[in-house]
Amino acid sequence: MTERDLTGATWFKSSYSPTQNECVEVALVPGSTGVRDTKDRDGGTLIFPSTTWSAFLSTLKD
């Protein structure tokens, strides 16, 4: 993981859970992807390089 500033990033969650507050949110910024828990937004954020996040999503789709 890399340290990145996500201040001002736009967070979103899956369109499959529009009314749920028990999921994760994702923010895409140049070079990185942030992931946090919707129930505890101040509890910490995992930050992954964009290439790692893309590989994760590709694996899920397979």
Image (cartoon, grey):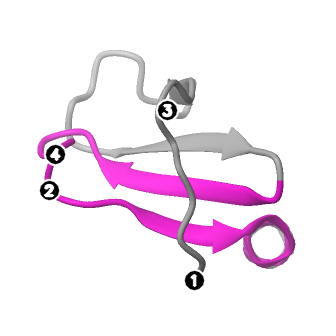
Q: Position of residue 35 (x, y in %)?
A: 46, 55
Residue range corresponding to the magenta coloring? 31-56
**Disc 3 vs disc 2: Cβ atoms closer than 8 Å?**
no
Q: How many marks?
A: 4
Disc on the earlier residue, 2 or 1: 1
Q: Relative to 24, is 44 above or below?
A: below
Disc on the earlier residue, 3 or 2: 3
Q: Amino acid at mark 4?
A: Asp
The residue shown at (73%, 75%) is 56
Q: Position of residue 18 (x, y in %)?
A: 41, 17
Screen quadrant of the N terminus: bottom right
Disc on the earlier residue, 3 or 1: 1
Mark 3 to mark 2 CA distance (whole Å): 17 Å
Q: Position of residue 27 (x, y in %)?
A: 58, 40
The residue shown at (47%, 34%) is 7
Q: Is residue 11 magenta-colored?
A: no
Name the secondary structure under disc 3: loop
Q: Report crowding for label 2: few under 14, some 14 to 19, many 20 or more residues within 10 A (C-alpha).
A: few
Name the secondary structure under disc 4: loop
Dividing the picture into quadrants, the one containing residue 61 is bottom right
- The residue singled out by tag 1 in the image is 1
- The residue singled out by tag 4 in the image is 42
Mark 3 to mark 1 CA distance (whole Å): 21 Å
Give left or right: position of 58 versus 34: right
Of circles 3 and 2, the one toward us is 2
- The residue singled out by tag 2 in the image is 43
Mark 4 to mark 1 CA distance (whole Å): 18 Å
